[in-house]
């Protein structure tokens, strides 16, 4: 009777649900992002390793290699995620560019979101470490441009071409060169700490670039 009662209890007990592999994978991925960014900020890019990231994240090394082929790939993806997380109120600024019909207002809005990212300690510390390493490590520098910068640059180019079509920008300019009037001064000031970065500063960059320096 005792055995039969035990069997009946086992049959009537609700079955335990299987672990949610998707949720577990997302937790691991998030832990790896955080670990990679923290380590590159603390130790620099050269001393950051897959083994160190795995230990910091509390996952196996093979878990990382299952998703990424190198530490550079881990950091690139972590940075793309960080860019989205650092300015949620601005929307996915890394993948969209507003087009309200006013090119000056649109570029100013994107640059203001960029200022927010650059002043966010979560973004600033590890990004400075990567940017510095990209100057001396040509391969990493090229990957930074191709995977992190170029998608955003392409959006600037597309917005400036739309402004050309609308007659707001001269038709004979090269948008790839023109966007550097916005991007390069901000990047230099931030990287070399030659002055504060602010909304007022980036707004002025846009006004100078679109209206020129010659007397009107």
Image (cartoon, rainbow, N blue to C red):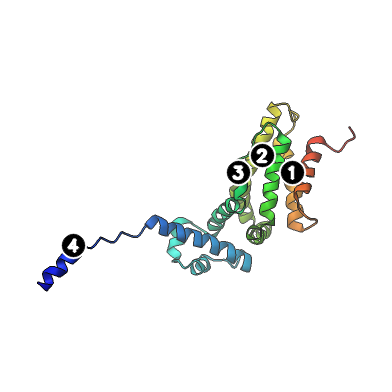
What residue occupies the far right of the structure in this picture?
215
Residue 151: numbered disc: 3
Q: How many marks?
A: 4
Residue 118 at least partly seen: yes
Between disc 1 and disc 4, whose residue precedes?
4
User: Badge 3: few (under 14), some or many (20 or more) residues near its Cα, within 10 Å?
Assistant: some
Q: Residue at x 83, y 37 (%)?
A: 212
Q: Secondary structure at mark 4?
A: helix
Left or right of 193 on screen, residue 14: left
| Along the viewing direction, whichever of 164 and 137 lies nearer the viewer | 164
What residue occupies the far bottom of the structure in this picture?
2
Q: Residue at x 60, y 52 (%)?
A: 83
Left or right of 174 on screen, residue 70: left
Residue 44 at least partly seen: no
Q: Secondary structure at mark 1?
A: helix
Determine which residue is flagged by label 1.
Answer: 182
């Amino acid at each position: 009777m005792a055995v039969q009662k035990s069997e009946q209890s086992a049959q009537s007990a609700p079955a335990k649900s299987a672990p949610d592999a998707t949720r577990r994978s997302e937790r691991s991925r998030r832990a790896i992002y955080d670990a990679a960014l923290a380590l590159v900020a603390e130790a620099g890019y050269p001393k950051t390793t897959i083994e160190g990231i795995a230990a910091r994240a509390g996952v196996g090394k093979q878990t990382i290699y299952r998703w990424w082929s190198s530490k550079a790939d881990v950091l690139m993806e972590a940075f793309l995620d960080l860019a989205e997380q650092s300015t949620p109120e601005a929307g996915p600024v890394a993948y969209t560019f507003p087009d309200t019909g006013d090119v000056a207002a649109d570029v100013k809005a994107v640059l203001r979101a960029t200022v927010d990212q650059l002043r966010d300690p979560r973004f600033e510390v590890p990004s400075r470490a990567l940017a510095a390493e990209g100057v001396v490590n040509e391969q990493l520098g090229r990957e930074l441009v191709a995977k992190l910068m170029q998608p955003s640059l392409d959006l600037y180019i597309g917005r400036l071409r739309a402004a050309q079509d609308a007659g707001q920008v001269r038709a004979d300019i090269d948008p790839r060169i023109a966007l550097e009037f916005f991007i390069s001064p901000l990047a230099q000031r931030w990287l070399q700490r030659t002055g504060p970065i602010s909304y007022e500063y980036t707004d002025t960059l846009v006004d100078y670039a679109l209206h020129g320096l010659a007397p009107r």
